[in-house]
Image (tube, rainbow, N blue to C red):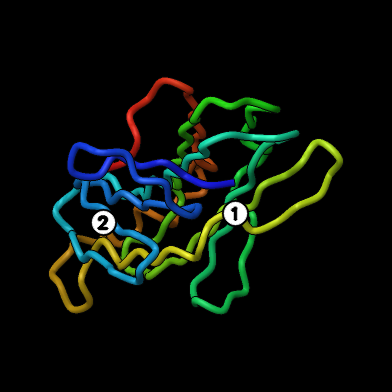
Amino acid sequence: MAAIALVCGSWLLAAPYATVLGQDGSQEQATGASSESGETEEYKNTIRWATASEVDNFGFDVFRGEAEDGPFAKINDDPIEGGGTTDSPRHYSYVDDTIDPHQVYFYYVESIALDGTREQFTPIAKVGPKIKPGSEASDADRDAGDSDDAASGDAAESGESEPPI
């Protein structure tokens, strides 16, 4: 499967990708770039990916680790519903709202075929901490990712949404 992204007004056919959006809207591509923005009250990472077409696609799982070489753990409770078989581009996203704002995270997306076959769909994407080491963040900010009441994340999918820029 390949991804389509709108780049400078023209369509670009590319390999599967993932984009991680920080709470402030900053993007972090799977190139290893990271962002250190600590100017938000709520800490979360949004992972976006797309398909150009799908064949027998049941869905996707999102994995997160604290090191580029793992270990990784699945962070969505249920698979994010795929498009089955379609020639239309589809855009997906997952919101990880269970993060520690001081931690660097690495993410990848795994595709699940209707026959149960799984394969890593995206490269590993790195996202930096939301609070810079040594910053004067409040205790409430430090504990934001440690709440027992934190949700396990939200998934969204749409065949009509705009591709990540």
Query: Image quarter for residue 141?
Result: bottom left
Q: Nearer the viewer, mark 1 or mark 2?
A: 1
Which one is in front, 35 or 56?
Answer: 56
- Residue count near mark 2 (Cα–Cα under 10 Å), binned few <14, some 14–19, many ≥20: many
Residue in the picture at 49% in, 60% down: 107
Residue in the picture at 34% in, 59% down: 29
Q: Quadrant of the C terminus?
A: top left
Label 1–label 2 contact, CB within 8 A: no
Q: Which mark is residue 121?
A: 1
Could you tell which of marks 1 and 2 lies nearer the N-terminus? 1
Vertical relation: 12 (above or below) 121: above
Let me know if residue 41 appears in the view. no
Q: Secondary structure at mark 2?
A: helix
Side of 119 where 64 appears, left or right: left
Which residue, as the protein is rendered here, is positioned at the far top?
160
Query: Image quarter for residue 83?
Result: top right
Residue in the picture at 41% in, 20% down: 160
Side of 89 where 80 appears, left or right: right
Vertical relation: 36 (above or below) 113: below
Which one is in front, 52 or 34?
Answer: 52
Q: Position of residue 102 (x, y in %)?
A: 32, 68
Which one is in front, 66 or 15?
Answer: 15
The amino acid type, in three-letter code, at marker 2 is Asp
Let me know if residue 161 appears in the view. yes
Give the residue at mark 2.
141
Q: How many marks?
A: 2
The amino acid type, in three-letter code, at marker 1 is Phe
Q: Position of residue 31 (x, y in %)?
A: 35, 68
- Between the residue at mark 1 and the residue at mark 2, the CA separation in whole angstroms equals 33 Å
